């Protein structure tokens, strides 16, 4: 296996008769509905292995953001419940799962794990149920807390099981359920975690030319990975708000909805990019819209960025026009790349889809390149807009779809997978 040999692997663990606590990234529920079960399906190999080796499974994942960052209040409701995931797994695998309930504080979510769960663990050991699925980890106050409070919750989680398996590469934040629990139990990397790390190694040692396509809604969260990518790749294409902020910074234009903070970050990036001439590939044709309410006839238009004079004010820029991707210089770069990393939805979903469709179709025309797709939104848009291509990509060895784009960008920023906190925690084993 082409990865850090110090990483403890699930295939080397003695699982027979053990209760195994598995952290997964099943964060696929939006307002109570699963739009794409890919991240759930990607963990089934690990779950089958544990079951086949005689282990008893307790699952846990986070779902959404039930915690208000300003007030610290945690909202427990159906929008961020694991119930849709449990229903999906029960139907798909023909198993019986139970979700424990705990005392709910009015504003602080679940205070901790109570002894009532012991009844379920006894049922699990007696084969009366096939697994336990913990409530959303972010419903617990200790999950995202710091210091002693996080440590206490991690200790409670560890008390449920004999072994910890982390199969949630996409959940890279240092929380109780991803990092803290590994201090207290023998801990191992699941098969999905191993596969994601292996695929990341390709980005660290890319086949060249290496093209990266990155879009996003905030420059501040992406700027460090963008610096790292610009160093390592041969070409970089930006999309979304990132590209809009870049255009404002470089061409001194104004675009509605772009925060000054993002423009300030973009100015630093424009300056930084001067040290890497020719690497940043500019998309010439952009789509301006007068409204965010849809692609309404007569209320949107295409501009060539090179025709925009300094001081120009534009309404919302919500897409890259398809002709931008088919400019000879851009097309040549995409079709001649040997490796392509895509963490990008080029337009404002669900209305402005032209740029994303043109990009994904063009990338697919490059039959030789290794294509690495990262991120839930990137994956969901590929499935929604080009379902045939998405289904083909799942089984095509030239494609790999990461379960978490943020984790991939963080790993690119660190320059090594062992720089990510949950993986550090496993390496300490």
Image: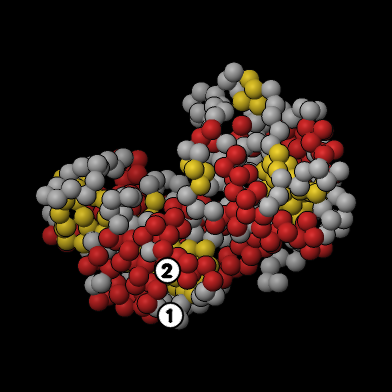
The residue where tag 2 is placed is: 389
Q: Is residue 132 above or below residue 209?
A: above
Marks 2 and 1: which is nearer the front? 2
Taking the spot 28% from the left edge, 50% from the top edge, the residue there is: 351
Give whichever of 116, 93 is nearer the camera.
93
Q: Is residue 408 above or below residue 206?
A: above
Apparent side of residue 98 relative to residue 71 in the rendered image (left or right): right
- Residue 8 can be seen, yes or no: no
Quadrant (top left/top right/bottom left/bottom right) for the N terminus:
bottom right
The quarter of the picture where residue 147 lies is top right
The quarter of the picture where residue 126 lies is top right
Taking the spot 52% from the left edge, 63% from the top edge, the residue there is: 401
- Residue 319 can be seen, yes or no: yes
The location of residue 262, given as percent across then percent down, is: 35, 44
How crowded pointer 2 is (Cα within 10 Å; few <14, some 14-19, many 20+) is rated as some
Apparent side of residue 422 relative to residue 399 in the rendered image (left or right): right
Sequence-earlier tag: 2 or 1: 1
Give whichever of 122, 264 is nearer the camera.
122
Taking the spot 16% from the left edge, 57% from the top edge, the residue there is: 302
The quarter of the picture where residue 243 lies is bottom left
Q: Helix, strand or loop at disc 2?
A: helix
The residue where tag 1 is placed is: 367
């Amino acid at each position: 296996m082409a990865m850090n040999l110090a990483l403890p692997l699930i295939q080397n663990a003695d699982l027979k008769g053990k209760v195994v606590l598995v952290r997964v990234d099943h964060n696929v529920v939006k307002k109570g509905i699963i739009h794409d079960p890919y991240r759930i399906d990607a963990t089934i190999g690990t779950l089958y292995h544990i079951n086949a080796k005689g282990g008893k499974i307790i699952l846990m994942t986070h779902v959404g953001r039930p915690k208000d960052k300003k007030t610290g209040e945690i909202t427990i409701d159906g929008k961020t419940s694991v119930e849709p995931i449990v229903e999906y797994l029960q139907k798909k695998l023909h198993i019986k799962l139970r979700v424990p309930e705990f005392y709910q504080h009015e504003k602080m979510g679940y205070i901790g794990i109570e002894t009532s769960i012991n009844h379920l663990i006894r049922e699990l050991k007696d084969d009366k149920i096939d697994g336990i699925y913990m409530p959303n980890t972010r419903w617990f106050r200790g999950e995202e807390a710091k210091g002693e409070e996080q440590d206490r919750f991690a200790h409670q989680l560890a008390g449920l099981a004999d072994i910890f398996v982390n199969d949630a590469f996409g959940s890279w934040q240092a929380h109780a359920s991803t990092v803290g629990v590994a201090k207290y139990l023998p801990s191992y990397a699941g098969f999905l975690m191993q596969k994601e790390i292996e695929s990341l190694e390709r980005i660290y040692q890319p086949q060249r030319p290496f093209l990266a396509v990155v879009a996003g809604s905030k420059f501040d969260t992406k700027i460090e990975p963008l610096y790292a990518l610009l160093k390592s790749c041969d070409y970089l294409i930006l999309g979304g708000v990132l590209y809009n902020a870049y255009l404002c910074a470089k061409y001194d234009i104004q675009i509605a909805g772009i925060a000054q903070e993002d423009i300030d970050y973009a100015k630093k990036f424009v300056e930084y990019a001067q040290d890497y001439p020719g690497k940043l590939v500019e998309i010439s044709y952009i789509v301006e819209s007068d409204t965010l309410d849809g692609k309404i006839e007569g209320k949107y238009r295409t501009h060539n960025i090179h025709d925009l004079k300094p001081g120009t004010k534009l309404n919302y820029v919500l897409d890259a026009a398809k002709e931008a991707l088919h400019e000879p210089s851009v097309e040549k770069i995409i079709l001649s790349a040997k490796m392509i990393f895509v963490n990008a939805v080029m337009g404002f979903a669900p209305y402005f889809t032209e740029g994303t469709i043109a990009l994904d179709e063009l990338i697919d025309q490059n039959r030789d390149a290794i294509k690495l797709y990262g991120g839930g939104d990137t994956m969901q848009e590929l499935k929604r807009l080009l379902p045939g291509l998405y289904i083909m990509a799942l089984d095509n060895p030239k494609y790999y779809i990461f379960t978490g784009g943020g984790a991939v960008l963080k790993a690119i920023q660190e320059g090594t997978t062992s720089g990510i906190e949950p993986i550090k925690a496993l390496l300490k084993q």
